Amino acid sequence: MKLKFIFLVYLLQILSINVFAQESDVKTLIRSPLLGNCITCHQFPGEAGKQGNFAPSLIGVGKKYNLDQLKQWISDARVLNPNTLMPPFGSINGLSQPMVNQPVLTIEQINKIALELKTYN
């Protein structure tokens, strides 16, 4: 019973995040479990706390790729690397069971994240 209560509190905290009101904040896009959630798999420059190490670090990614390439990686990395484990945040093409019939991120959100990544030199 206590575990159910803790889960319910956690769920309410997640749902109470007003993601859409803060969607212009690129850090929210990067950190939010409901949106990009990039920080779960990637390491970011200047970020404190828990960061992922499953995927490549994004430190210096702005030097490695141009803006269009960064947008493509975020939108659908399968175009650049068919064997990638990175989910397609801007596409549902080729997914057998998408939870909703729309991409996780909008084009505007992808552009904001890509512009942020471009500053990681």
Image (cartoon, rainbow, N blue to C red):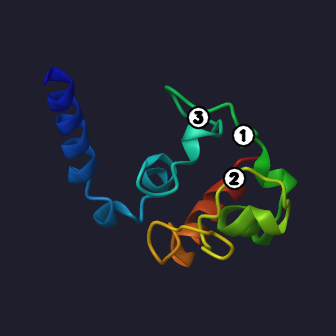
Which quadrant holds residue 82?
bottom right
Q: Amino acid at mark 1?
A: Ala
Residue 13 x %, y % = 22, 42
- Would you say 107 lies left or right of 100 here? right
Q: Amino acid at mark 3?
A: Gly
Quickly name the residue at label 1.
55
Circle 2: element type: loop
Circle 1: element type: loop
Tell me the distance, in whole angstroms, between the alpha carbons under discs 2 and 3: 22 Å
Any part of residue 70 in sight = no
Residue 11 x %, y % = 24, 43
Mark 3: few, some, or many residues within 10 Å (few <14, many ≥20)?
few
Quickly name the residue at label 3.
46
Contact check, label 1 and label 2, Cβ < 8 Å = yes
Of pointers 1 and 3, the one earlier in the residue sequence: 3
* Label drawn at residue 86: 2
Q: Amino acid at mark 2?
A: Met
The residue positioned 67% from the left and 62% from the top of the image is 74
- Would you say 119 lies left or right of 3 here? right
In the image, farthest residue toward the top: 2
The residue positioned 41% from the left and 65% from the top of the image is 24
